[in-house]
Amino acid sequence: MRLPPVVSQPFFLVVIVTTVFLQLMPPALAANLPTSKAVSHAAAQQELTSVPASLQFGEIRVGQTSNQFVTITNRSRASLTIFEAASTGAQFTLSGLDLPLTLGEGESFTFRVTFAPRAAGAAGGSISLVSRTSRKTLTMQLSGTGAPAGQLSIAPATIDFGEVREGSGGIQTGKLTATGSAVTVSSATLNSSNFELRGLSLPLTIPAGASVPFTVKFVPRDGGISSATLSFASNAENPLSEEAVTANIVGPAKHRVQLSWKASTSKHIVGYNIYRGSRSGGPYRKINRALDPNTRFTDHTVAAGHKYYYVATAVNWRKTSSSYSKQIRVVVP
């Protein structure tokens, strides 16, 4: 049995309408909704940024401090208020950040973070900034290492020149040693003009475990005991290192030559003359002021380190002199 045409026509229209409705529907409507949420979340994460993203202080000596600066920027399209800053790690502190802090669109702010190691070894921490607008937290990681404090030692403990003749001098050596960590020696002083420090070009840095030699020259200018203090200024835990420098200055050595001879067997001898020369065989010069009736004579006018040649003559009552005696040679120390 055939349906009337009037019945089949509406059915056909329904199918067409349904088909048109399906074509007008966005084919990925359900998929777009989660994608839109993900983009919004990523944008919120980037609302507040920092440069640098983390702070690495490296190795800092115990007892010293190191500063770094952080710049935060509002990347959102509206004002953003930071109402909380939380930090961990007792050796890290932040300053210059007064809360609450409001940043306009694209506005930046810079504050300081300080690392002050209290003990040797690695240290870590963090800084978290909480925004009132987005309730998002920006966290920066902090790291650093405390280096042992350096020590500066001097050897020997005392520089002693002993007994030094006036007009002469001497040189003694010493050394500076750094332990724990490197030490920078900035200056040195010697509080006496009788001593001079040599061999160091200051300032200088001595690596940990290394030694640097130096010399002290002694040039005595007056008699007596001379003493001084040698001081080194540095960035060591013991910033001022000192040692004593001493010397005993004695006057120039005094030498004399004592001469003696056998009496002449000639008749009517009344005395003797003594002669001295600087070369063997003369010429000679008489060194006694008056005729000496004795057979001994002391020469007090000699100098250290010199050679002398002596002869003597016998003189009778008529003031007639004999020929020179046998020459003797004397070396003064």
Image (cartoon, helix red, strand yellow):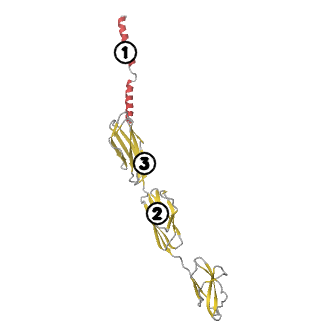
- Element type at marker 3? strand
Q: Residues within 10 Å of mark 2 (few under 14, many from 20)?
A: some
Of the pair 5 and 95, the residue shown nearer to us: 95
* Amino acid type, mark 3: Phe
Sequence-wise, the earlier of marks 2 and 3 is 3
Q: Is residue 322 above or below residue 216?
A: below
Give the mark toward the camera: 2 or 1.
2
- Element type at marker 2? strand
* Amino acid type, mark 1: Thr
Q: Which mark is residue 326?
A: none
Q: Position of residue 253 (x, y in %)?
A: 54, 77
Q: Which residue is mark 1?
A: 18
Q: Position of residue 164 (x, y in %)?
A: 51, 73
Q: Are marks 2 and 1 in contact (CB under 8 Å)?
A: no
Q: Which mark is residue 189?
A: 2
Q: Quadrant of the image for the C terminus? A: bottom right
Q: CA distance from mark 2 to mark 3?
A: 35 Å
Q: Position of residue 127 (x, y in %)?
A: 37, 44
Give the mark toward the camera: 2 or 3.
2
Number of marks present in the image shown: 3
Q: Is residue 177 above or below residue 65?
A: below
Q: Which mark is residue 57?
A: 3
Residue sitting at x 62%, y 78% = 307
Q: Is residue 140 visible?
A: yes
